[in-house]
């Protein structure tokens, strides 16, 4: 009798184990089917992010067309919203023949060139130039009125919506640390001396002239309606004096990570901090378009970058020093008087 009881108990245990294993199997199959049906992943591991490809990864329908138009606006700006627009019924917003990607390189995807990867995730944000919380649309119009030497895009225009749509597409799902790598410019240690435009000219001849020309007027694309392969760095068709690139320290940061083109990168720059600093001063020593009403920029003058070349300023330093330095005395002044630490 005891033996029969033991056998029944053993059989019951075995049946229970088999049932549990079977239920677990069904659960795995069910979850796998659900993930297939709904495209869902039940893994806790982070999904790998890769830079979206404009040819392969566009969304379908209206959204995809909008993103593609935003890409064309960024890469062929004068053709679609500037002086080369054929349909004169469409307003011309850009005042020069630069493209957005002449600064935001590789259609806004190159790290260290003011990349647009992740940019919409950082807005709204405070902007010292306006002294308020600003939207991505307002930031775009800052470029339109300064770097593009034109006029603001209406926020409900197809051009504005397409540019924002393209930026949002580049920003979808990007991890925070990856976005941090792409954004902004590199740091440059500010030299103690005044910028030397004679030395800067030699750097320009050695490193920049082959693309931008002896006269700094750049090289146009084969289809000139699409703009420049290498943009003019001064003169009538360049950015105006209200643009960030007209500040020597900002320009030096951009130059260090990106020039010479196709050689320098954020991870492996070619020029030293000093070379970038002096050649930025040389480039900004020439005439360029003048933006009206720049005296209204930076309502709180204490927030004005030290290398902003136009006044007014909230310090005793002359215009020449704000343009070419030396910048350390200005930096020290704001630190000691206002407890504001400036890096550019």
Image (cartoon, rainbow, N blue to C red):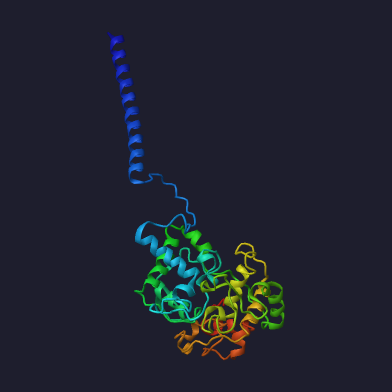
Q: Is residue 298 above or below residue 40?
A: below
Of residues 26 and 104, which is closer to you in this image? 104
Relative side of 203 to 156, left or right: right
Of residues 198 and 195, which is closer to you in this image? 198
User: Could you tell me which residue is drawn at 39 percent across and 76 percent down?
Assistant: 133
User: Could you tell me which residue is drawn at 67 percent across and 75 percent down?
Assistant: 209
Q: Quadrant of the C terminus?
A: bottom right
Q: Is residue 105 above or below residue 341?
A: above
Q: Quadrant of the N terminus?
A: top left
* Residue that extends furthest to the front in the rendered view of this protein: 86
Residue 157 lies, in percent from the top left, at 36, 74
Relative side of 234 to 156, left or right: right
Residue 188 lies, in percent from the top left, at 61, 72
Q: Is residue 31 above or below residue 92?
A: above
Q: Is residue 127 above or below residue 290?
A: above
User: Could you tell me which residue is drawn at 61 percent across and 79 percent down?
Assistant: 217
Residue 18 lies, in percent from the top left, at 33, 24
Q: Quadrant of residue 289?
A: bottom right
Q: Is residue 119 visible?
A: no
User: Could you tell me which residue is drawn at 31 percent across and 9 percent down?
Assistant: 3
């Amino acid at each position: 009798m005891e033996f029969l009881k033991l056998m029944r108990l053993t059989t019951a245990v075995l049946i229970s184990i088999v049932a549990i294993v079977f239920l677990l199997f069904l659960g795995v199959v069910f979850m796998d089917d659900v993930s297939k049906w709904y495209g869902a992943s039940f893994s806790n591991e982070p999904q790998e992010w890769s830079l979206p490809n404009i040819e392969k990864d566009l969304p379908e329908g209206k959204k995809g067309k909008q993103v593609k138009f935003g890409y064309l606006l960024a890469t062929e700006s004068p053709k679609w919203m500037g002086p080369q627009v054929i349909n004169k019924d469409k307003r011309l917003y850009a005042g020069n023949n630069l493209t957005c990607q002449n600064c935001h390189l590789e259609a806004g995807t190159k790290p260290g060139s003011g990349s647009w990867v992740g940019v919409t995730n950082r807005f709204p944000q405070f902007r010292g130039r306006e002294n308020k919380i600003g939207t991505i649309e307002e930031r775009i119009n800052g470029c339109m009125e300064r770097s593009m030497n034109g006029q603001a895009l209406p926020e409900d225009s197809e051009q504005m919506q397409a540019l924002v749509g393209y930026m949002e597409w580049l920003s979808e799902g990007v991890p925070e640390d990856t976005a941090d790598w792409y954004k902004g410019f590199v740091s440059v240690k500010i030299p103690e001396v005044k910028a030397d435009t004679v030395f800067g000219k030699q750097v320009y001849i050695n490193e920049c002239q082959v693309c931008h020309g002896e006269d700094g007027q750049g090289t146009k694309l084969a289809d000139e309606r699409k703009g420049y392969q290498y943009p003019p760095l001064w003169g009538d068709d360049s950015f105006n004096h209200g643009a960030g690139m007209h500040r020597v320290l900002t320009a030096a940061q951009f130059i260090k990570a990106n020039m010479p083109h196709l050689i320098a990168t954020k991870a492996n720059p070619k020029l030293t901090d000093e070379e970038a600093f002096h050649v930025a001063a040389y480039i900004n020593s020439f005439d360029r378009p003048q933006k009206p009403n720049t005296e209204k920029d930076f309502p709180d003058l204490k927030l004005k970058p030290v290398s902003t070349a136009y006044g007014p300023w909230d310090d005793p330093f002359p215009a020449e020093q704000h343009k070419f330095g030396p910048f350390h005395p200005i930096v020290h002044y704001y630190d000691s008087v206002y407890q504001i630490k400036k890096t550019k």
